[in-house]
Amino acid sequence: MPRIWLLCCYACVLLLQSAPALELHATPVEKLQNVPGIVYDVAQDQQDFLWLAAEYDGLLRFDGTEYLRFSPANAGPPFSYSQVVNDSQNNLWVATWGHGLWQLDPQRRHWHQVSAPVPADARIQFMQHDKAQNLWIGTTTGLYLLRANATTAEIVQPLLGQRIWQLTEQSDGTLWVATSQGLYQFNPVSKASGSWLQIGDLAGTEIRAVTVHGDYLLIGRRAGIELLDLRDGVIRHRSDLGNTNVFMSESADQWLVGSIDGLYRQRLTPTGLESELLLPAVDARSLYRDRQNNIWLSTRYSGLMRVPEPPLKSRQPSVSAFISPTQKHRLGPHSVTTSARWQPLEKSLLQLKDGRWQELIFAPEYQVAYVRDVVEFAGQTLVGTDQGLYRYQPDSGLTPVHLQTNTPRLNIERMARAADGALWLGLWEHGVYRIAAPSDTAAALPPPVQLQTKLQAQEGVIDIQQDAQQQLWLLSRQGKLYQGLPTELKLRWQPPQDLATGYFNCLLAEADQFWLCTDRGLLRVSKDFSQVDMLSLAQGLPDIRVIGITRTEQFIWVLTRNGVMLMRPDGTDIRLLTPRQELNLAAAQLHGIVPLPSDQVQLATSDGLWQIAHTDLTPVPTNMQLHLTEFRLNQQLFSLNESNTVLQLPARVQELQLKFRLLSFQRHLQVNYFFRWNAQQHWTAFGPEAVLTLSQLAPGRHQLEVMAQAGGQFIHTHPLQLDVPVPWWQQPAGIGLLTLAGSLLLYLSYRYRVNRLQQRAEKLDALVAERTQALEAANQQLQHLSNTDSLTGLMNRRALQYAAGLLQAQRSRHAAPLTLALLDIDHFKQINDMHGHDAGDDVLRQVAAYLRQRLRSQDLLARWGGEEFLLLMPNTTLPQAQQLVDALRLGIRTLDTSPLDIALSATFGISPVETSALALEQAIKAADMALYQGKTQGRDQVVLAATAS
């Protein structure tokens, strides 16, 4: 019997050893752990990957996030790479510093060193393809030419021994070569003999950079930049910007200049050359514009950098003088009347008059907290605020307008003039008022008429807009769309049930459609209300929470706190605002985007006002590619070329990890990935990262498809086939062997089972006891969860009431003092409104953690609801409790809320708890009344209940 068992085991080992090995054309690569520090050149291949020539890190492939290192096999010590270019066949030509010229094939597997006459130890300074796809190779000892489809290079004899810095080509084929001894000109097409440029001090001088710029030749050297007119050979302009390494044209009279001192923008003006420093203290080596129109800067010691976008213009005149750097303001949407331009500034109003801002202050007794709108009506300038309507007059300033209404306080959210001249007031939670246009501008304002019959109680209007047909439309916080008629509000549309949750923020009424801003995306509703579309991240929005929308001549602009997007009214030509250092969109204001002439907008943040043109936004690329950038097989990293669409996997695959990436090179572009397995009908979401880990794949062929959604586009990969070999136990020999081994195992199992039955019976009792104990522990855990507040980790109301009941029962037997405190975080609604509910949740957790840390072990603390907390202090007299609570109040004021920059405070109400059955409920009511008294007295204080004083 043992011999048969050993024979079965030996056969299994032989079958396992005969499993097929890995059969795929893939390249083992290494992931660079650090960002490369010295990059001399960059190129883009036909798959849109960027390739970097780095000094210490080698040849690197960059997908926008990660770097993979490619190296020739058995090439000795690591090379210092100096240049890289890609040709029309997708070959990479890689130049080194001291190891000659190499070619890497389109599959990125085979390296070939180019020799004869290029020395194997050549130090290559420069490489470039001309219009005929000939490759020019500039070294420290001469210039070489590798013609298209040729296998060997040829040397340019007149430049033998010269150090070649750069080369540029004119439209007629003439080449200008920058060398260590001057500028050399020749035409390889016409076979004309070359000549050295003999103009002024350029003769015999080292030229480091050269480029053709229209009818001009830009020449860079250590002493500065020369602008040579090719028509007459005269130097037209000079600049003292020296140490130049590279030029790149931006327009007919503007180009980028990279030098060892930084990156500059050079402009040709009627008075000469003007320089603007873009990036200081960087040693710029090359500039490259990729197919997505990004400009990359290769530098020494600063790695690969993206050339920054031009800075945004601050709206002039600036309002910065009126904004505190420590206590930010909430800027409202600006208003323009026939008399002035107006800018609400939270509790005050700015008026632009005679080219200067002046601040209009409300009298303190008016208690105005927010200014929301300015209109001219009935010959008067009216200002809408949270405290009602005010009139501005130059001689008397801001004075209230007393209107006879049924509403105790007119908290005005929006104002609008209708086509018939009437003024409409949209209120927060109190409906809409309409004031008819008076026949005489000198007369008093007619009494307002409330049009609230069609609005639900406390619904509130948050935006009023007039369309191209001069119809008035009103949007409520719940998303209901009303048409404003002279005598009523007519409900025309309300969101379906799946869209009714969440808040609506703003409205844009177009001639043929409505745009509704929500915190779940942007709704597009047809004018006849028959079609409703939701635009979200998949359609290009930078964030689903939309806080502003406006229309200029050609575009619709959408504002979120994660980016600004514009598009054509039909949803095409999407452009996004790239992140700018000077613009903090997290501080963007609700309704903070308004139109300006010439397809420009004004953007309001808590830092100031910005003027943005449509040219400041970057178009979403239309030719983006999605690739499998890498895969790991049993922890080994490989790079797979796009032509390989079949992966023949080995029999023993512990883990297969596939990573995909959309090559947009635009960090502000929101990308979501999806995959589909074996041609399933529905796609499964990856999220913002496309990493798929596979294990225990069934034998056979599997198909994987990956899709990316970005900027309103859907980009697909080629379907990838995964071949998993049939395991040995499903082959004929393996089936026979398993049958024999199975019979043997059945017999041995029968004998073994008899001996094990008694042992298992003994263990059964122990297992039952163990499971019972585990069940009790689980029940205790569930009980804990039911008594805990999920946000703060404190006791919830139910748990505290139970614990308080036990305390009261103990006090009925052993009387001891018990004091109760109720606290409420001040201005918590403003924190949610200004910074979002996520910030509010962080504040609640921070306050809860502080209270739990400072309280004694005997005290009980619970979240009572919203921003309220309840504290029970056993064996604590009222004076002791007052002293403890006041220390807590002072501690809350010192909590660090950065980066929100919020000054926290809390108000406390304290009451003793008697020993009667209803004492706890009475104490809570008394503490709540004391808390309310503290709120009305100014907040941030401790108030004793009336029964305790």
Image: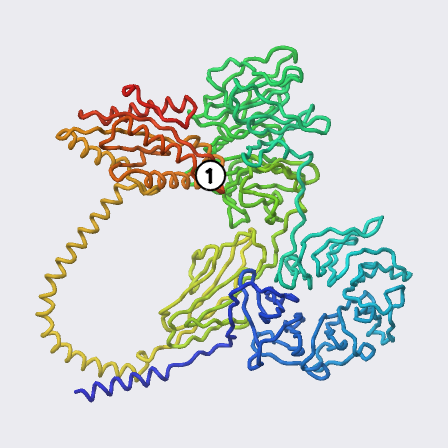
Q: Closer to the camera, 10 or 393?
A: 393
Label 1 crowd bin: few (<14), some (14–19), many (20+), radius 10 Å: few
Residue at 24% across / 38% down in the picture? 858
Whole-percent x, y for residue 844 in the image: 38, 38
Whole-percent x, y for residue 222 in the image: 78, 63
Quarter where residue 196 is shown: bottom right
Quarter where residue 39 is shown: bottom right
Query: In the rendered view, does 224 fall on the left or right side of 888?
Result: right
Question: Which image quarter is the N terminus in?
Answer: bottom left
Question: Which image quarter is the C terminus in?
Answer: top left
Whole-percent x, y for residue 363 in the image: 56, 19
Q: Closer to the camera, 452 or 614?
A: 614
Element type at mark 1 = loop
Residue at 32% across / 25% down in the picture? 928
Q: Closer to the camera, 100 or 88?
A: 100
Q: Give the residue at the far top of this rendering.
A: 443
Query: In the rendered view, does 859 fall on the left or right side of 374?
Result: left
User: How many numbered marks does the figure carry?
Assistant: 1
Residue under circle 1? 836
Residue 394 vs 594, above or below: the answer is above
Residue at 76% across / 53% down in the picture? 266
Whole-percent x, y for residue 374 in the image: 61, 25
Q: Give the residue at the far right of this rendering.
A: 232
Residue 483 vs 622, above or below: the answer is above
Quarter where residue 560 is shown: top right
Residue 325 vs 371, above or below: the answer is below
Query: In the rendered view, does 949 fall on the left or right side of 463?
Result: left
Display colour scheme:
rainbow
Q: Amino acid at mark 1?
A: Gly
Q: Closer to the camera, 64 or 425?
A: 64
